[in-house]
Amino acid sequence: MHSVTWFELPTKDLDRAAGFYEKVLDLSLKREVFFEVPHAIFPAEEKEIRGALVKSDNHTPSTEGTVLYLRATDLDASLARVKAAGGSVVTPKTSLGPIGFIAVIDDTEGNRVGLHMLA
């Protein structure tokens, strides 16, 4: 059982943020509205942790505090797309030995987010 069941990354501009993550991670986000709050939902399998980008006045993007790590199936390719998509690489690809590789980026909204690729 996972301790985390859902996450939300705040955005200033949901379409811009969704475009950034779709380009960097080479995936499609599903647009939904829950409780009058626009969401762009990350794809996930049935028993995986789920989450979304959200556009809400109650949430503020930040480079301080918690860092959420998203799966990158090809970390080198994802990092190569970050700058062109409007973000920046804060920590380059770093080995974690048998559990894979990580990197840290700043997105278009002002969030600091980690990327993780399994070994």
Image (spheres, helix red, strand yellow):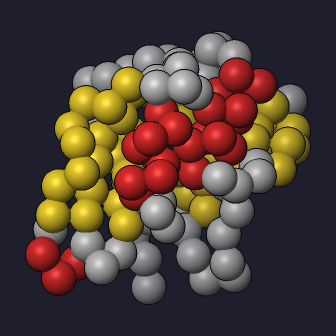
Tell which of 62 and 99 is nearer to you.
99
Q: Is residue 8 left or right of residue 102?
A: right
Q: x, y percentage for residue 107?
A: 47, 27
Residue at the image point whose x is 80% and y is 31% from the top: 38
Where does the C terminus fall, quadrant-wise? bottom left
Tell which of 46 and 29 is nearer to you.
29
Tell which of 69 and 101 is nearer to you.
101
Is residue 42 something one can see in this rendering?
yes
Picture layout, residue 107 above or below residue 96: above
Tell which of 77 and 71 is nearer to you.
77
Residue at the image point whose x is 76% and y is 38% from the top: 39
Residue at the image point whose x is 32% and y is 31% from the top: 89
Residue at the image point whose x is 63% and y is 14% from the top: 12
Q: Is residue 55 left or right of residue 102?
A: right
Picture layout, residue 54 above or below residue 49: above
Q: Is residue 83 left or right of residue 27?
A: left
Q: How many marks?
A: 0
Q: x, y percentage for residue 46?
A: 69, 81
Picture layout, residue 88 above or below residue 81: above
Is residue 35 something one can see in this rendering?
no
Q: x, y percentage for residue 20?
A: 62, 32
Where does the N terminus fall, quadrant-wise? bottom left
Picture layout, residue 1 above or below residue 80: below
Q: Is residue 80 left or right of residue 65?
A: right
Please identify the quarter of the rendering in which residue 19 is found: top right
Q: x, y percentage for residue 10?
A: 56, 28
